[in-house]
Amino acid sequence: MTTSLYPNAVKPRHGIFVETRLRQVLATGHVEAAVIAPVPWFPFRSARFGAYGDYARVPVQEARYGIDVAHPRYFMLPLLGMRLQPLAMAGALERAILRRRRESGADFDLIDAHYFYPDGVAAAHVARRLDKPLVITARGSDINLIATLAGPGRAILEAAATASEIIAVSRALADRMESLGIPGSRITVLRNGVDAKLFRPAPRAEARQALGLPQSGLLLASVGNLRPEKGHELAIRSLRHLPDARLLIVGDGPDEAVLRRCVQEEGLGDRVHWSEPMAQDRLRLAYAAADVLLLCSAREGWPNVLLESLACGTPVVASDVGGVSEIVDPSVGRLVSERTPAAFADAVRDLLRTPVEAAAAVAYAQRFDWATIADGQVEVYRRASGRTPVTLPTGSRTAHPDTVRESS
């Protein structure tokens, strides 16, 4: 597998959704994998250089959950980097593959790339050079945003033409790819699942105590990278219309200073609580502590936070973008088509008028099981590598990948 969206020792939650899917696929026993997750080269490790310093501190090689992960470096120029990044990444990827093949003496069957640009485009270059089948997974902004840019858009279509199989994490994303000219017959929809053993309910009072939050009152949560497109500012400003509510924001990112200024401008200093990104076993407590999860994003592919929250028994209010409508049913949440603070506040009030039982939210989330999705991923690999399908072990579930939600 190759992707720049993969956790590492410095950023353990970066791209954790890709790692989770891979672990579930490996658990089927039908696949062996190594990960090549390139990072930009940077000479200085100091934290004062921000994200670039983080890149420098990422180990060249590490193991996570028994999976070998290589982090080869590639050269990326600021400003010019977007157009040159795929070729630079391709060079790093090919060198890492050839090195691994020399050292292990073993070949591989296919390349699995996650995120179309630059990752999928880079992988397509390498797949053509090494004459290997390629699977590319589209995940959201790669298709919804980057594909609208002239140069990257052309490169994405060329990579799609190279790929033996293409995966979309939502039906909406598959439809968007078809509108760009990618044949629908080559696209498989494999939605993300949720780990119900990891994300599960906890007593609200205990969760709030563990996180140092007030015991009483309405608590909303907004979880995700602190970037403009995630809409945390809308979540903050919605408190104007919900005078009895507090907000817990979990995440970090370049928009933090802007968001903190927004809190001060609104006079909400004592009603907004901040937390850095949490390990998943602790993130469960953030979901369980909240009465409602807010997702105010401008763009999404398949936002895992919604299923995670539901699996912890907490209903959701979310922007009606991307694949969100494929997750949120009126029985467990509300969709918001107009992204304004007032609209989100109205949706919260409407949801609370007919409270969602925690058990109902959990049962709903458990329909999105990982086993069916992992089996579907294995079938995609088999088709891509040209292998004859074999019978899966007793107890595993195989469904048409585009009906995962309905059959799970």
Image (cartoon, rainbow, N blue to C red):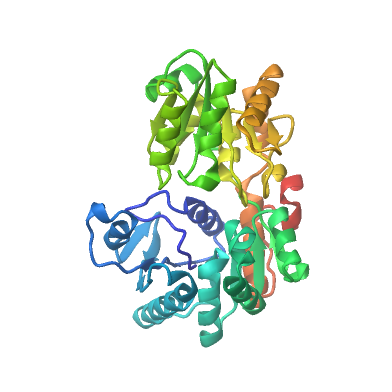
Q: Give left or right: position of 384 versus 220.
A: right
User: Where on the picture, by quarter, is residue 62?
Assistant: bottom left
Residue at 38% across, 40% down: 257
Q: Give left or right: position of 303 versus 263.
A: right
- Of residue 310 and residue 180, the one placed in the foreground of this image is 180
Residue at 60% across, 31% down: 341
Q: Give left or right: position of 154 versus 287.
A: right
Q: Is residue 354 above or below residue 6?
A: above
Q: Is residue 36 visible?
A: yes
- Of residue 218 and residue 66, the one placed in the foreground of this image is 218
User: Where on the picture, by quarter, is residue 102?
Assistant: bottom left
Residue 312 position in % (x across, y down): 55, 31
Q: Give left or right: position of 267 versus 299.
A: left
Residue 336 position in % (x across, y down): 69, 36
Q: Is residue 149 above or below residue 194?
A: below
The quadrant of the rendering that contains the C terminus is: top right
Residue at 66% across, 56% down: 190
